[in-house]
Structures are given as structure tokens and as C-alpha cells.
Image (cartoon, grey):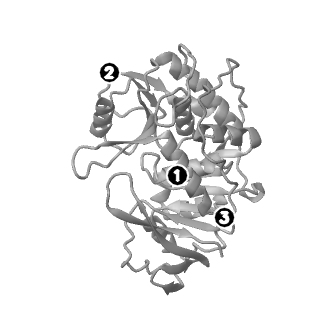
Amino acid sequence: MDVIDRIEAAATRHGDRAAHTYRGESLTYALLWSAATALSARIAGELPDDGSPVVVYGHKESAMLVAFLGAVRAGHPYIPLDSSWPADRISSVVEESQTQLVIAVRPLPEGVITEVTVLDGSVLDAGEVPPGPVGEPRALDANDPYYVIYTSGSTGRPKGVQITASALARFVDWATTLVPDADPAPTATFSPEPARFSPEPAKFSPEPARFSPESSGHEVWLNQAPFSFDLSVMDLYCALTTGATLYSVDAPTVANARELHDELGRSGVSVWVSTPSFADLCLADPGFTADLLPRLGSFLFCGETLAPTQQPPASFVNHVSHDYFEVMGIPIVRGRSFTEDDERERSTTRRFAK
């Protein structure tokens, strides 16, 4: 079962559950899946069946997830671009990727040069689909690109890194084992059967869903990194393939210590995914304790260097040994991984079951 099929299975099992929560509003699995299905037909009607990438521009809106899944369901990889990017970098990626379609969840900034079709993706949050022709979506093959992440360009021109559907599926197979209590994702297999498309229009409720961590009873994964950063793939797809809730905090919230503290307190987060430096920033707040996050059971760190010789940050309490320490009583053990943008060895930390 590939990643898209796993998400469909989660939507079938947990339709009323919040798939994504952002700034106090949630999109349920049922609405996420039906909106992505409708959008996939719209994309298939806009683009030829050539596997060309779809650029998705925005930040942490639920519409970003709808656009990602809609593109993939239509047989096209997506390229996530964050609203924090300068106009010249956005223009460069649009030109270099040879995309024919941009879904703008937020309005593109002035100065972006593009001669391709731009769809208004802001309506996706409300379950609407931009008007226009529709077509028949197709399924991705295992070796087709699922998404393309552009590097920072710190060593030159940004480069697009293509991640195939099978590579993402294998990553999810592994990553979901890092959380002992997570609902396991089905083992990855790929079917030659085409994606199923229903011509029935999606049905949406005008009332926004509200997330209640006290009554969730399932894992809630923190999304700290923007979707244009490869770190976000861990929380995004581990959450959606296991029927968990993805809880996003955005850049303005992170920049405001009081607002961040309050947002985390409302989140009900049980699985923390971030860079080590973001966790260190939070741990500098005396109020960042187990009382603030009573459901937190796992820390997953990645996305930046944590060298074997580097001491854990001073705020990482209960340092037991060089490769083992505790944060708020949760054991953390060093491990190794690679980032997508280079071949240098990077390290990640993970929680082991107590």
C-alpha cells in the first residue's frame, strides 16, 4: 500500500478526526480527502498526463496539504514553496522546474515572474476548488517523483531534489516505528491499478472543525518546519498515514515567545518533531515543562547538525552519558541519518521506549 492509499485508509477509518490543525481551526480527514480528490480532477483537467510538477505556494494553511495530495492523486509531483521566500527565488524555482501550474494558497508576492497558469488555492481551506476543466486522475508509479524539495542555494543556485513515491513509502515504514504507541502504517506496496475517481462533488460543512486535545486519544505530531524544508516530511506523512493529527505552528508564532508558549499549551502534542535548536529555544522558557505538554511522549530531532562530539544544549537536563540524556524525563539517544541536500553525515536524536 503506497502513501496515498494509506492516507485514504486513514480518512476512511477516522473521517471525523482532525487531520491538520492550524491557528485554532482543523481540517478533518474526510474533508481533506474529498477536497484533494476534487482538486486532483481539476489538476488533471489543467495539465497533460506528463508527470510535470505542480508548484504549491503558501505557509502552514490546511490548503497546502489539500494541494499536495491533489497534485499527487492527479499523477504530478508537487514542489512546496514557502511564503517567506524572496520573489526572485520563487521566480527562479518556477522557471527552473518548468512547471506549468502554480497553486497559490497565498497571493504570490510582487515581482514573481511567471508565465504559467496560477490557480487560487486559498479557496481549498473552505473545501472549494478553483473553477475550470476537470479530467481523470492517474496513479503515480513507484519510481515516479512524489515531491521535489529545493535546497537553500547556500552553495550556489538552488537545486531540486526529487523523492520518489517508493522512497517516501520506505521512509514512512521506518519513521513510524520511532513512536512506540503510533498506529502503525500499513507496509508499503504498489498496485498497478489506477487511482479511483468519483465524479460526485465533495460535501463540506460551513462550520470549521475545532480540535480538542483532551478528547483526541490519538497521537498529535508537531509541525515546526515549513513544508518547503525536508524536515517537515517526517511529521507530515507520519501523521497522515497513521491517522494522527498534524499540529502546525507558524513563523509569527515561533517569533513570539508568549504566543508560542500558549500555542504549545493548547496543542496536545504527543510527538515532537523539530530541529534541535528549536527545542533548545523552547527549553529556555522556564514554563516549558511536562505540565505544559502532558501528552508529550516522543522527541524526534533532525534537520541540522548534532555532531557526536557536541555536548547537548545546557537546557537538556539530566545528561546521563555522551550519547544518552533526558529531556523532561523522556530518554533521548543519538542516531545517524542523511539530509536530502548533501552527502555529509548528519545526526538525529530519537526517543527509545522506556
Image quadrant assignment for residue 312: bottom left
Image quadrant assignment for residue 160: top left
In the rendered structure, which disc, 3 or 1, sits on the residue that comes first in sequence?
Answer: 1
The relative height of residue 261 versus residue 232 in the rendered view (above or below) is below
In the rendered structure, which disc, 1 or 2, sits on the residue that comes first in sequence?
Answer: 2
Q: Nearer the viewer, residue 106 or 20?
A: 20
**Is 336 on the left or on the right of 2, as rendered?**
left
Q: Secondary structure at mark 3?
A: loop
| Residue 195 in view, yes or no | yes
Disc 3 packing (10 Å; few <14; some 14–19; many ≥20): some
**Distance between the alpha carbons at the discs numbered 1 and 2:** 35 Å
Identify the residue under disc 2: 115
Residue located at (75% from left, 43% from top): 14
Q: Secondary structure at mark 2?
A: loop
The relative height of residue 340 versus residue 7 in the rendered view (above or below) is below
Which numbered mark, 3 or 2, is in the foreground of this view?
3
Disc 2 packing (10 Å; few <14; some 14–19; many ≥20): few
Placement of the C terminus among the 4 image quadrants = bottom right
x, y percentage for residue 301? 49, 64
The relative height of residue 201 versus residue 274 in the rendered view (above or below) is above
**Label tally:** 3
Task: Name the amino acid, label 2.
Answer: Glu
Task: Name the amino acid, label 3.
Answer: Pro
Identify the residue under disc 1: 171
**Distance between the alpha carbons at the discs numbered 3 and 1:** 16 Å
In the rendered structure, which disc, 3 or 2, sits on the residue that comes first in sequence?
Answer: 2
x, y percentage for residue 7? 64, 41
Residue located at (52% from left, 36% from top): 68
Q: Secondary structure at mark 1?
A: helix
Per the rendering, the mark at residue 180 is 3
Task: Name the amino acid, label 1.
Answer: Phe
x, y percentage for residue 87? 30, 37
